[in-house]
């Protein structure tokens, strides 16, 4: 059994994080400028590492005040169902709390309802979405 280490604001390797994102979301590998985006827009981010390999990720963006937002929660499928996602989200919540945020928002697809509401403690709310492109 390997130990999972959680690292806040780790140095991001764009290739590695893009590969994790592709594996977690069943997409093709499209390398994104994660490091640049996170440095510019994120309040914080957390990586889960197993044997120095990135196996999970979450970021927290914010409005600079009371509201923070969980984005891009991802766990590699080979490491799923081990509590990694929950620990990532709880770590993200702690980062937002420590920054003085009052609210942490998350949007999710219906199949993730039990994860976010039951496992992570979010409560359901009404929300809206506008497709821009």
Image (cartoon, rainbow, N blue to C red):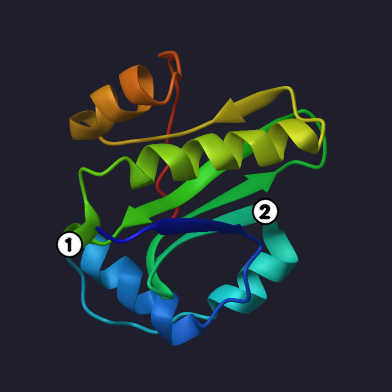
The reply to whether residue 121 is visible in this rendering is yes
Q: Residue 13 shows which numbered tag?
A: none
The reply to whether residue 25 is visible in this rendering is no
Q: Nearer the viewer, residue 14 or 9?
A: 9
Q: Residue at x 52, y 34 (%)?
A: 90
Q: Nearer the viewer, mark 1 or mark 2?
A: 1
Q: Residue at x 67, y 53 (%)?
A: 44
Q: Nearer the viewer, residue 118 or 71?
A: 118
Quadrant placement of the N terminus: bottom left
Is residue 68 positioned above or below 41 on the image?
A: above
Count residues near mark 2 (Cα–Cα under 10 Å), then give few for <14, some for 14-19, many for 20+: many
- The residue where tag 2 is placed is 44
Give the quadrant of residue 3: bottom left
- The residue where tag 1 is placed is 78
Q: Residue at x 26, y 36 (%)?
A: 109
Q: Nearer the viewer, residue 7 or 98?
A: 7
Among numbered discs 1 and 2, the one appearing first in the sequence: 2
Disc 2 element? strand
Is residue 119 positioned above or below 59 on the image?
A: above
Q: Position of residue 27 (x, y in %)?
A: 21, 70
Q: CA distance from mark 1 to mark 2?
A: 25 Å
Q: Position of residue 52 (x, y in %)?
A: 43, 75
Q: Position of residue 105 (x, y in %)?
A: 55, 30
Count residues near mark 1 (Cα–Cα under 10 Å), then give few for <14, some for 14-19, many for 20+: few
Horizontal side of 117 relative to 71 (left or right) equals: left
Q: Position of residue 116 (x, y in %)?
A: 36, 27
Disc 1 element? helix
């Amino acid at each position: 059994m390997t130990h999972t280490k959680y690292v806040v604001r780790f140095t991001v390797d764009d290739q590695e994080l893009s590969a994790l994102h592709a594996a977690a979301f069943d997409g093709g590998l499209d390398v994104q400028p994660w490091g640049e985006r996170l440095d510019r827009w994120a309040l914080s981010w957390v990586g889960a590492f197993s044997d120095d390999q990135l196996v999970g990720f979450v970021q927290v963006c914010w409005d600079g005040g009371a509201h923070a937002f969980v984005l891009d929660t991802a766990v590699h499928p080979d490491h799923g169902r081990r509590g990694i996602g929950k620990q990532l989200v709880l770590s993200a919540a702690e980062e937002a709390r420590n920054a003085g945020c009052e609210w942490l928002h998350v949007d999710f697809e219906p199949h993730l309802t039990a994860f976010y509401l039951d496992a992570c403690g979010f409560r359901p709310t009404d929300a809206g979405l506008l497709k821009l492109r």
